[in-house]
Image (spheres, helix red, strand yellow):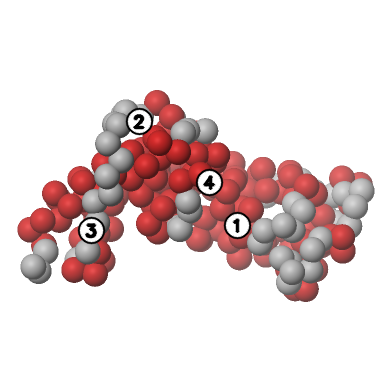
């Protein structure tokens, strides 16, 4: 599944130069072993993050096959560019950014946005719905809506971060969130308790 994509000669600098605040000692050791080309360490890194990253890819693409493709492409990039990981953020956040970018490209995200000038926010009382109903309706959202909704409401990204990751404007990101919430509110209206 994984090729020996990282080797010691690819890494002129060592992980030791990373900021200690962002990289825990066990993670630092794992990263260095991956950079040294240790296949078991690469497998361990993949196993540690693959399920969460697949879930994120699936939430964006709403397609198991596409999510698997995104996961594979993302981890190819992770192992190819691991030598460039600076430890400024957590390793998980770095991998998540790669997955989001790959998922956006995979679904031809930028072509699916609609323009909308009104930037009103529709509050949705999520606590009033069952998790199954929410998950079902989120997965049924159009791709652009679903992607931005997932990144803001589930993953906690800000619109500025989403705009950078997906190559869209902040305004487009806000618009997609607005529309996603409007559609969710309409579809879940029958399940509201009050």
Closer to the chain start, of discs 2 and 3, is: 2
What distance separates the C-alpha of mark 4 from that of mark 2?
17 Å
Q: From the image, tell me which residue sits under label 3.
A: 124
Q: Residues within 10 Å of mark 2 (few under 14, many from 20)?
A: some
Task: Identify the mark at residue 161; answer none if there is no mark.
Answer: 4
Residue at the spot 68% in from the left edge and 48% down from the top edge: 78
Q: From the image, tell me which residue sits under label 1.
A: 93
Question: Helix, strand, or loop for circle 4?
Answer: helix
Residue at the spot 72% in from the left edge and 57% down from the top edge: 88
Relative horizontal placement of residue 157, taking residue 59 as reference (left or right): right
Closer to the chain start, of discs 3 and 1, is: 1
Foreground: disc 2 or disc 3: 3
Foreground: disc 4 or disc 1: 4
Relative to 110, does residue 9 appear above or below in the rendering? below
Depth check: give the residue in front, 53 or 43: 53
* Residue 15 occupies quadrant: bottom right
């Amino acid at each position: 599944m994984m090729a020996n994509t990282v080797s010691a000669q690819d890494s002129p600098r060592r992980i030791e130069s990373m900021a200690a605040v962002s990289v825990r000692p066990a993670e630092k050791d794992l990263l260095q072993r991956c950079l040294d080309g240790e296949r078991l360490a690469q497998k361990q890194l993949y196993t540690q993050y693959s399920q969460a990253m697949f879930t994120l890819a699936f939430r964006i693409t709403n397609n198991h096959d596409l999510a698997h493709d995104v996961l594979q492409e993302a981890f190819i990039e992770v192992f190819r560019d691991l030598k460039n990981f600076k430890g400024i953020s957590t390793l998980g956040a770095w991998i998540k950014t790669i997955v989001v970018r790959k998922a956006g490209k995979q679904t031809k995200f930028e072509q699916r946005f609609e323009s909308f000038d009104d930037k009103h926010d529709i509050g949705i009382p999520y606590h009033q719905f069952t998790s199954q109903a929410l998950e079902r309706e989120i997965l049924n959202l159009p791709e652009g809506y679903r992607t931005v909704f997932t990144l803001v409401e589930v993953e906690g990204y800000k619109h500025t971060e989403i705009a950078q990751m997906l190559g869209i404007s902040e305004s487009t990101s806000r618009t997609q969130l607005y529309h996603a919430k409007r559609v969710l509110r309409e579809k879940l209206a029958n399940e509201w308790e009050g």
